[in-house]
Image (cartoon, rainbow, N blue to C red):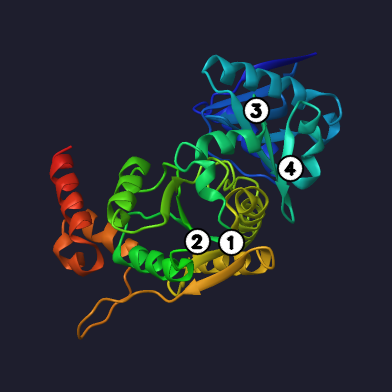
């Protein structure tokens, strides 16, 4: 006999069983809001699966009990719970070899990478969902021009380096094409998406032929960039960047008629450098990739403008040090935000 029950990770014995089962399946623990397990009469954990918001993950089954439908039972419990919290669409990021377990439950494969697959299930197709979201920001009539340009930025926060990248991309557009700037909507950055999106829009409102849009759940998000089952950092980045590039190529390029994606040169961050390398390998020939050199501060001591340095100055209450890194609007916004949060 087996029984389905919620796993409490605050109970050491249950957590140890969960981690052990993940390791047996070549997986690792990730952040979860809810976790279910199937136990036998001897209280051995036979299968598990969890959820964070509308992202389902950490599915594992004891090798002796695979093929018995245990994953289906856990998936059903997770979906029932998520529906009760008003989630209507769901993602599963899993090993490529495990995708078929979920397609039988109404999930469709959005895209695959070398070792992974991203699946989706919702009331509407991924295409319909993206169309409805983006048409709020730019009517379809505005997208008909061919070979537009795109930039994807986190802007955590927006700096003069981001402004430089956008200005260089607009030179390519030459008042004939549109530039779409997608701001990473994932709200796990130091500055909130609300603040980051606001700063991007305010800092480019004097420019023409540009649309600032949220990236959606389908691009650089918790759904497309989880890392719980990939143990090596390099492999994490490789799988995630491959998947992200292919989703961009499959869903974003045709909808926005994107002919070129602009990237900022990345001499400082290894992960971002690998991301750029993957995009260069994956997007052409359907979408050209152009890398723009990083902007430096003016004066005797030229320094590469970095959002990391801005965040560091913000945390250290030394914003005066990065005045040359950001616009006056961003600087005043950060000062105001710091004063607002002082003492909290």
**Marks 2 and 4: in contact by CB < 8 Å?**
no
Say whether disc 3 or disc 4 marks the residue closer to the N-terminus.
4
Say whether disc 2 or disc 3 marks the residue closer to the N-terminus.
3
Say whether disc 3 or disc 1 marks the residue closer to the N-terminus.
3
**How busy is the neighbourhood of tag 4: few (under 14 within 10 Å), some, or many (20 plus)?**
some
Mark 2 lies on residue? 177
Say whether disc 4 or disc 2 marks the residue closer to the N-terminus.
4
Q: Nearer the viewer, mark 1 or mark 4?
A: 1
Which quadrant does the C terminus fall into? top left
Q: Nearer the viewer, residue 306 or 20?
A: 306
Task: Tell me if residue 43 can be seen.
Answer: no
Mark 3 lies on residue? 124
**Gap between marks 3 and 4 measured at Cα:** 32 Å
**How busy is the neighbourhood of tag 2: few (under 14 within 10 Å), some, or many (20 plus)?**
many
Residue at 44%, 46% in the rendered image: 213
* In-image side of 191 versus 83 (left or right): left
In the rendered image, the residue lying farthest to the bottom is 300
Mark seen at residue 147: 1
Which quadrant does the N terminus fall into? top right
**Marks 2 and 1: in contact by CB < 8 Å?**
yes
**Gap between marks 4 and 2 measured at Cα:** 48 Å
């Amino acid at each position: 006999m087996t029984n389905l029950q919620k796993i409490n990770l605050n109970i050491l014995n249950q957590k140890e069983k969960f981690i052990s089962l993940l390791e047996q399946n070549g997986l690792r623990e990730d952040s979860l809001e809810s976790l279910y397990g199937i136990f036998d009469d001897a209280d051995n954990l036979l299968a598990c699966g969890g959820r964070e918001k509308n992202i389902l993950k950490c599915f594992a089954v004891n090798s002796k009990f695979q093929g018995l439908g245990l994953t289906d039972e856990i998936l059903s419990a997770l979906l029932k719970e998520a529906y009760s919290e008003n989630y209507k669409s769901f993602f599963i990021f899993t090993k490529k070899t495990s995708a078929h377990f979920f397609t039988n439950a109404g999930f469709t494969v959005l895209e695959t990478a070398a070792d992974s697959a991203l699946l989706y299930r919702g009331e509407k197709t991924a295409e319909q969902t993206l169309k409805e979201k983006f048409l709020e920001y730019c009517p379809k009539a505005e997208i008909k021009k061919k070979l537009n340009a795109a930039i994807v930025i986190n802007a955590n926060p927006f700096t003069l380096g981001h402004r430089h990248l956008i200005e260089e991309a607009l030179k390519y557009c030459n008042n004939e094409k549109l530039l779409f700037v997608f701001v990473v909507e994932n709200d796990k950055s130091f500055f909130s998406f609300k603040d980051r999106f606001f700063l991007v829009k305010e800092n480019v409102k004097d420019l023409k032929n540009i649309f600032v849009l949220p990236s959606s759940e389908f691009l650089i998000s918790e759904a497309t960039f989880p890392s719980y089952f990939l143990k090596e950092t390099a492999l994490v980045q490789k799988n995630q960047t491959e998947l992200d590039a292919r989703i961009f190529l499959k869903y974003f390029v045709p909808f926005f008629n994107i002919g070129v994606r602009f990237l900022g040169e990345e001499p400082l961050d290894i992960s971002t450098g690998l991301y750029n390398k993957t995009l260069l390998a994956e997007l052409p020939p359907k979408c050209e990739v152009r890398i723009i050199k990083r902007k430096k501060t003016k004066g005797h001591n030229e320094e590469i403008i970095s959002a990391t340095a801005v965040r560091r100055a913000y945390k250290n209450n030394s914003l005066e040090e990065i005045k040359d890194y950001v616009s006056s609007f961003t600087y005043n916004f950060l000062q105001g935000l710091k004063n607002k949060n002082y003492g909290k």
